[in-house]
Image (cartoon, helix red, strand yellow):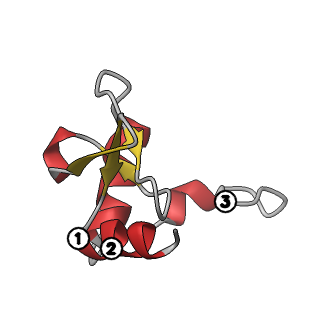
Amino acid sequence: MEDNEEESPEEELPEHRGLTSSEEAFMRGYLDDDNETAECTECGCLLDEATKPLKKEIDEEELLFCSKSCLEDYRDSF
């Protein structure tokens, strides 16, 4: 490499290890356009069938949640 060339930051990225389940779901949704994704109604994290979202019908609308705590937080907000 010549002295005046800079390395691209993408080349130096570490492997994605130690991600939370929400981060993993985001990466799957971001990298795989074939998967249908949705957002958690409470926190907005990305969900897909691999994350097994909780489904709850509230006011005749099916809502999706990433966790029981998000579902409870949503209920408590009313």
Q: What amino acid is found at the position of numbered circle 3 in the picture?
A: Glu
Q: Are marks 1 and 3 in contact (CB under 8 Å)?
A: no
Horizontal arrangement in the rendering, residue 75 relative to residue 43 (left or right): left
Please identify the quarter of the rendering in which residue 65 is found: bottom left
Residue 15 at what x, y percent from top left?
A: 33, 66
Which mark sits nearer the N-terminus, 2 or 3?
3
Which residue in the structure is indicated by mark 2?
72
Q: Is residue 20 above or below residue 64?
A: below
**Residue 3 shows in the view:** yes
Q: Tally the numbered discs.
A: 3
Mark 3 element type:
loop
How packed is label 1: few (under 14 Cα within 10 Å), some, or many (20 or more)?
few
Q: Nearer the viewer, mark 2 or mark 3?
A: 2
Q: Residue 71 or 23: which is nearer the viewer?
A: 71
Q: Residue 38 or 33: which is nearer the viewer?
A: 38
Q: Residue 77 or 55: which is nearer the viewer?
A: 77
Which residue in the structure is indicated by mark 1?
68
Q: What amino acid is found at the position of numbered circle 1 in the picture?
A: Lys
**Residue 16 shows in the view:** no
Residue 11 at what x, y percent from top left?
A: 52, 57
Which residue in the structure is indicated by mark 3?
7
Q: What amino acid is found at the position of numbered circle 2 in the picture?
A: Glu
Mark 2 element type:
helix
Q: How far apart in space, not on screen, are marks 2 and 3 (Cα)?
A: 47 Å
Q: How far apart in space, not on screen, are marks 1 and 3 (Cα)?
A: 44 Å
